[in-house]
Image (spheres, rainbow, N blue to C red):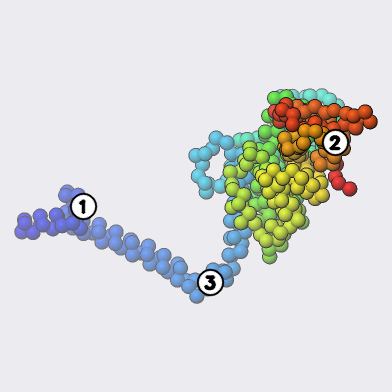
Amino acid sequence: MERTERQRRNHPLNRSIAPSESAGSSTSTSRRTYSNRNRNSDYKHSKYNTNSNRSFEEDSDWRSRRSSDSKIYVQKLEAKEDDVGHNDRSHFDLPPVIVGTCPFMCPEAERAQRERLRDLAIFERLHGNPGKTSPGLAVKKFCRTMSAKSDQALDVRPLHVLENTLKYVLSFLDSKEQPFEVIHDFVFDRTRSIRQDLSIQNIVNEKAIYMYEEMVKFHVISYQKLLNGDSSSNASSMHHLNMQQLSKTLITLLNLYEVNRSNGVIFENESEFHSFYVLLHLGSNSQTTGESLTLWFRTLRSPVIKSKEMCFARRILRYFRMCNYKGFLCTIGAEASNLQYCILEPYVNEIRALALSFINNGGYKLNPYPLVDLSILLMMEESEVESFCKACGLATCGDELGNKSLPTKQTTFSSPRAAFQRYRFLKQK
């Protein structure tokens, strides 16, 4: 009898049971576990079998769930942009969506606090008083710690208030009373706050698309103006931060296009904003997204790929990487929009310097290159070609008739490390 009991306990199926457990308890535990597994399995199969005669596409809630999932994706994306120092939060731990009720551009509590702290931008001061403002002047500042879990509805602005706030803030871009750096600093912060309120309320409709398009335009224009401004360390820092937010805002906008897609229809400005993404990858230090363009192109829809804006961007990218300066400059002169040129302007002077080095190294020494022909090739004013040559370390000469030219085979050529001054771009007639 004892041998039989010992053999039963040493059996491989019963080794996991503690020796102190009796035969009865081990049997009941095994039986209970098996029973629970059967119950869960039965529930699982019964849950799926209830819809076995109906396909997934025929589910009445399928489209609403798909739309909801897309909205959650955009919300995660926006939250990830500005959620610094909260990496321990679960990827699926989304904050609850709230509906803002603040009727002003700035919540009353924040406005009172900033008046008390004299924390008012120059555009928000009533009669120039740094400690006094009004509901028509104060605009909500960006707050990194803001979230739907901690904020109340009175602190968040609804969609129609955000639309009016954006129009008001962007109107300062036409102001000449303050330097652009001051204007940019104000608009940069307040548009970031607008994006934050859109994200907290999970607003991803077509009105949100329009607002994001306007904010991307602001960052693109700032990209050009900050590069052409002073070269101080503060301006360099502002340019870096602007590039960072331009990338984030543009990526969110491209995802909003997909969220609001219906029947494969392409939005009016979608192709141009997709082209911005390509043009921002021209320079070696411009790939801030970390995604390969080759893989990215495969995700685009056929109407976007075949659009004239995307064909232009892809040709520009190819000419730039092949050092085809003539194709690069001529294509820009013939097809670039104003916003596309804002992104391309720094690379225009880079390609001009490359063309100048080719002409200097490949030209015939006894035949100087006329500046008139050089201005046509570089698509710039003849009066500016001479200063451009000097910036590249090349000397020019003139004949008895006053015609200026560039002697070739000079060994003093060097690409300027400092930023070029702004040269006008002349389109071919």
Q: CA distance from mark 3 to mark 2?
A: 74 Å
Q: Residue tagged by mark 3?
A: 55
Front position among marks 3 and 2: 2
Q: Position of residue 28 (x, y in %)?
A: 23, 59
Quadrant location of residue 423? top right
Q: Are marks 3 and 1 in contact (CB under 8 Å)?
A: no
Q: Residue tagged by mark 2?
A: 370
Q: Amino acid at mark 2?
A: Pro
Earlier in the chain: of badge 2 and badge 1, it is 1
Specify the quadrant that holds the N terminus: bottom left
Q: Is residue 25 above or below residue 388?
A: below
Q: Which residue appears at 75% of the width and 45% of the height?
A: 328
- Disc 3 crowd rating (10 Å Cα; few below 14, some 14-19, many 20+) is few
Q: Position of residue 365 (x, y in %)?
A: 77, 33
Q: Residue tagged by mark 1?
A: 17
Residue found farthest to the right: 401
Count of marks overlaid on the render: 3
As helix, strand or loop, the secondary structure at mark 1 comes to loop
| 244 and 61: which is toward the camera | 244
Front position among marks 2 and 1: 2
Earlier in the chain: of badge 3 and badge 1, it is 1
Q: Position of residue 422 (x, y in %)?
A: 80, 33
Q: Amino acid at mark 3?
A: Ser
- Disc 1 crowd rating (10 Å Cα; few below 14, some 14-19, many 20+) is some
Earlier in the chain: of badge 3 and badge 2, it is 3
As helix, strand or loop, the secondary structure at mark 2 comes to strand
